[in-house]
Amino acid sequence: MTTVETVGGEWIRRDGDNVTLTITRCHACDARWFPPRDVCSHCASTDVHDEPTGDRGVVYASTVVRAGPAAYRPPYVLSYVDIDGVRVLAHGGTGEAFAPGTPVRLGIGEIGRTDAGPLMSYVITAEDGAR
Amino acid sequence: MRPVYVAGAAVHPFGKHPGIKAADLGYAAVRDLLARTGITPEQVDAGFGGSTYGGSLLAQRVLQRVGVSGQPVYTVENACASGAAAVHLGWQLVATGQADCVVAFGADNLTGFGGGTLPLTTGDIEIEQGMVMPAAYAMRAQRYLHDFGAAPEALSAVSVKNRRNGAANPRAHFQGEVSPADVAGSRPIADPLRLLHCCPNSDGGAAVLLCSAEIAAQLPTPAVRIRASAVRSGRFHTGYRDMTWPEITARTAKAAYAMAGLAPSDVDIVELHDAFAIAELLHAEALGLADRGQAHKAIVAGEFDRDGRVAVSPSGGLLSRGHPVGATGATQICEAYWQLTGQAGDLQVPGAEVALTHVTGGGIFGVDNGACAVHILTTD
């Protein structure tokens, strides 16, 4: 039997094939945060609430990591993805980096593997027709 | 505030020294510093030691071996900016009249980690997803090339220049030149960065003596003045920041230029934080050495060469000199000191009168960097 560890799993929302993330919005200054928090890290207001993102984003930048921790099994693609006011790091894609501006969709997948089993997290895939 | 001087500098050569602990590297530099300046332990009012991986109480463990024991001593951790932060704190004490003579040093030993990418230990969400420093810089590089139409060859030009400079530096980790073909043919690390676009994990130590005008006048060693010493932290947010513009560098540099009453065009030599080749382009722009989006043209045109418009990393920079993280900020001050006092040997930039050093620390989640330090030094 293997244990599945999910990185950031407490912030992942899944509804069928639809995957979104939980972010925090500050009502005092409109800042948005990921991972969520109970105090705004801009204005320190506690007038904040959690809300879901959409399930689609746009790649800001991307790379293929060819030297990195063995648990993530290099080479792996890392990208910064802009989603509804937050920028998140995500695995996804194969072989080469996404071009900046690539539209992507959130999903859940394996990002690595340790002795304890697979390491799961939110991942991205290019939307149809995009690369 | 009163003027503060650097009146001595010493470096334990950078490189792979697996048998020498961080404290021993720092000790070698501090011992050499006291020998060069003739400063006695009783004259030292305070000590600051910067280190990231050297362990608890590194500054005490180093300074007590040379008789600096009982005075206020602090070990400073600000990631790659640790050594520069130690210098900044020493500068504060002398500038405000609380001390006349301070030893500031930095030391780290990274061979203890084996090889590969530097382990990141802060346990944030990105590190849990496999983020490593080359990946962070690689994404900045991809976006810079995309936004400004730069060619990857501009990245290689940084490596070629800094390896050429470092080839003449007896304190550098790498003392050999590389060609553009060498860089292009080196092992890929994180696209578009290759091995020769990355600084090595090194071991080393560096120390400087900070003092008042009165002390400086008594010493056999020449002195240079610290015109500005500025440290800032990163502004945290998880929104859409522009990763081609290290605003922490721009903000820290602006404070330093204002303190010094100098402009980027006044600067003769710069030692900046070229942990990866792209970093030189980003920081050169944020320091005002090139217009926004134009540093890739400046590097290819030779404007940052030792005999160019402004000498950027005449010591070889992190790419050649190496990057024992806590020691880097302190060794930059040493290199600037030797340049401004005409003691830089084969590295000497003729007539250098104004030097700027810049180091950033820590690519932690949510900020460009956790810390940034900028110092401006002048011959008078």
Image: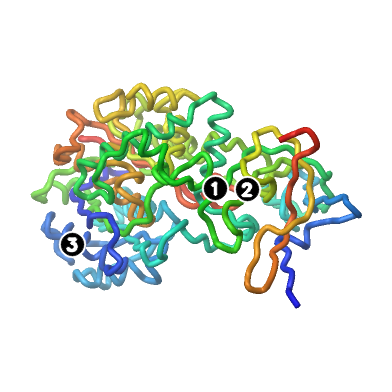
Considering only vertical position in the picture, is B224 above or below B291?
below
Q: Are marks 3 and 2 in contact (CB under 8 Å)?
A: no
Amino acid type of the residue that numbered disc 1 sits on in the rendered structure: Ala
Q: Nearer the viewer, mark 1 or mark 3?
A: 1
Task: Pick the quarter of the image with the N terminus of chain B.
Answer: top left
**Extreme residue toward the right, this view:** A16
Q: Position of residue B366 (x, y in %)?
A: 61, 49
Residue beneath disc 1:
B135
Is B200 displayed left or right of A70 in the figure? Answer: left
Residue at (69, 38) in percent of width and height: A59
Q: Position of residue B177 (x, y in %)?
A: 27, 39
Give the tally of numbered discs: 3
Amino acid type of the residue that numbered disc 3 sits on in the rendered structure: Gln
Residue at (50, 26) in percent of width and height: B150
Residue beneath disc 2:
A78
Q: Which mark is residue B43?
A: 3
Is B178 displayed left or right of B41 in the figure? Answer: right
Q: Chain of mark 1?
A: B
| Helix, strand or loop at mark 1 | helix
Structural crowding at the residue carrying mark 2, measured as other residues with C-alpha within 10 Å and reported as few (<14), some (14–19) or many (≥20): many
| Helix, strand or loop at mark 2 | strand
Q: CA distance from mark 3 to mark 2?
A: 53 Å
| Helix, strand or loop at mark 3 | helix
Residue at (39, 24) in percent of width and height: B298
Q: Nearer the viewer, residue B348 or B287?
A: B348
Question: Residue B166 sits in which quadrant?
Answer: top left
